[in-house]
Image (spheres, helix red, strand yellow):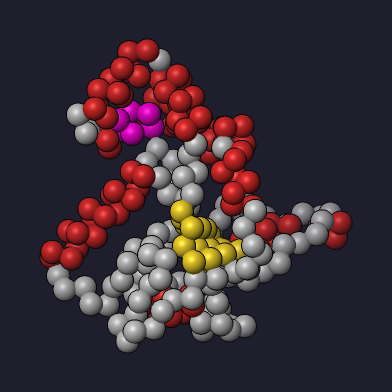
Amino acid sequence: MQSSVLDTNHHYCHEFEGIHNFRDIGRVVNHFLELRPYQGRIPTLKEGFLFRSGRLDQATLSDLRRLASKSNDSDIGFGLKTVVDLRTKSEHIQAEKKREKLNKRENRTSRVDAEEEAVLLADGEEMPWETIRIQFISRRYEMQLLKELGFFRAVLFLLLMLFQFRMKAIRLVGSYVLSSKGMVGLNLDMLEFCQEEILQVTSLPCTRICVLDFIPGS
């Protein structure tokens, strides 16, 4: 019996030097449809156009060239046109701090910041994709999470944010609200509270798109 759990070694996952969890969403969907006996009646998703990835902050020059290069062979290139960054403000702050520490510790000439709208390579090439940042966790959902914390924990959350203990405040929400929801509960919440953000993502032109996912509770 085949497992329905995502296998990071499967053919829909691509290996890079400095990018984790890069997956072809079309291949993922088609793979799971193949496991169902009624697959013939379900339209499959076109492969090679929509990807999901972890952050690109530590991508090597080789990784970025592969993302930018146009090719029918994914081992050579993907021809990305758009990168949609759904990460939260906290995740961007964490990434920036980590990048600063790494830059201080060693000379990272092979690494670049892939979040800028125009990513310049060492030899002066300009990456052809556009980066679009969307704050996927809406203000409405943030207020809902605050309500679910309860009065006293909500006060503690606000005090932590006031004194700039952002990560402790976020962990408070993660521990007392998000962890009990699970992925299914979180996705249902987002369908209810993040409709405008979902519309922003789905309204993008149908080019080769890579979505940088966010981490719940970050």
Whether residue 9 is visible here, answered yes or no, is: no
Above/below status of 85 relative to 48: above
Whether residue 123 is visible here, answered yes or no, is: yes
Residue ranking furthest to the right: 41
Residue in the foreground of this view, choosing between 163 and 156: 163
Residue located at (35% from left, 76% from top): 120
Q: Position of residue 39 (x, y in %)?
A: 81, 58
Q: Position of residue 67 (x, y in %)?
A: 48, 75
Left or right for 98, reference 76: left
Residue located at (60% from left, 69% from top): 208
Q: Position of residue 45 (x, y in %)?
A: 72, 62
Residue located at (27% from left, 35% from top): 166
Q: Image quadrant for the C terminus? A: top left
Left or right for 16, reference 164: right
Left or right for 158, reference 148: left
Residue located at (49% from left, 71% from top): 129
Residue in the foreground of this view, choosing between 182 and 81: 81
Over which residues does the magenta segment extend?
Answer: 169-174
Residue ranking furthest to the left: 105
Q: Is residue 122 magenta?
A: no
Q: Is residue 170 magenta?
A: yes
